[in-house]
Amino acid sequence: MITMEDIVREGHPALRQKAEELSFPLSKEEVILAEEMLTFLRNSQDPEISEKYGLRAGVGLAAPQLAISKRMIALLIPGEYEDDSPELEQVMINPKIISHSVEGVCLKDGEGCLSVDREVPGFVVRHSRVTVSYQDTTGKTYKKRFKGYPAIVLQHEIDHLNGIMFYDYIDENEPFALDDDISVLG
C-alpha cells in the first residue's frame, strides 16, 4: 500500500526529471503500480482510511512522485455529490496533450501537491480545455477532451512527467495577478 512516506517531496531529483515512455505490454510490476496509485487516491479520499494512515487527500498522482521515472499518472476526481460516482477515475499511460484552448483558467485557492508540504500562494494559469491522448494498462489508445477542473488536474499531473512543478507558473512578484480573460474556478 502506498502511503505518504512513499511520496517524494520537493527537492528530490525525480521531480525534476523527464519521465521515460512506457512500452507495451506493461510488466506485471507496472500494472501493479498503476493499481496501487489509484488505490492510494481512493484511500486518501476516504476519511477513515486517510486518518488511520495519515494520508493527505489527493486527486492525482504521477509515478515520478514515487521516484519512478515512468510516464504514468492516476486520477480520481470525485463526483459533485458524495454518493456520485467519480467524475474521472483513470490510470493514463504515456499521456500527451495534443491540443488545448487559448482560454486560461485557474483555481481560486491556487494548487496544492502531495509532494509539496507547504502552502504556495498564487494563481497557476492553465488551459481551460485540453485534448489528451493516452493508453490504458492494456495498451488501448484513447483521445479525450477535458475541461475545467479535470483539465487542470490533468495538466498538473502531466507536468510531473516533464519535471515541472505547479509553482513554476506562479509570478513571484505578483502571485495573484491575472489577465482579464482568465476564468477563476471556485
Image: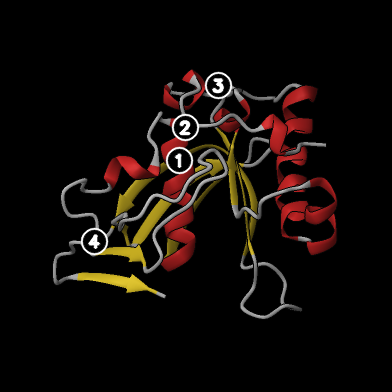
Position above or below: 32 against 45? above
Residue topped by disc 3: 69
Percent x, y of residue 183: 28, 72
Crowd class of label 4 (few under 14; some 14 to 19; many from 20; radius 10 Å) = some
Percent x, y of residue 181: 17, 70
Residue topped by disc 4: 176
Mark 3 to mark 1 CA distance (whole Å) = 13 Å
Q: Quadrant of residue 47?
A: bottom right
Position above or below: 99 against 148? above
Q: Nearer the viewer, mark 1 or mark 4?
A: 4
Mark 1 touches mark 2? (CB < 8 Å): yes
Q: Amino acid at mark 4?
A: Phe
Residue topped by disc 1: 158
Q: Residue at x 14, y 72 (%)?
A: 180
Mark 4 touches mark 2? (CB < 8 Å): no
Q: Amino acid at mark 3?
A: Ser
Residue topped by disc 2: 161
Crowd class of label 2 (few under 14; some 14 to 19; many from 20; radius 10 Å) = many
Mark 4 to mark 2 CA distance (whole Å) = 26 Å
Q: Nearer the viewer, mark 3 or mark 4?
A: 4
Question: Of marks 1 and 4, which one's residue comes earlier in the chain?
Answer: 1
Mark 2 to mark 3 CA distance (whole Å) = 8 Å
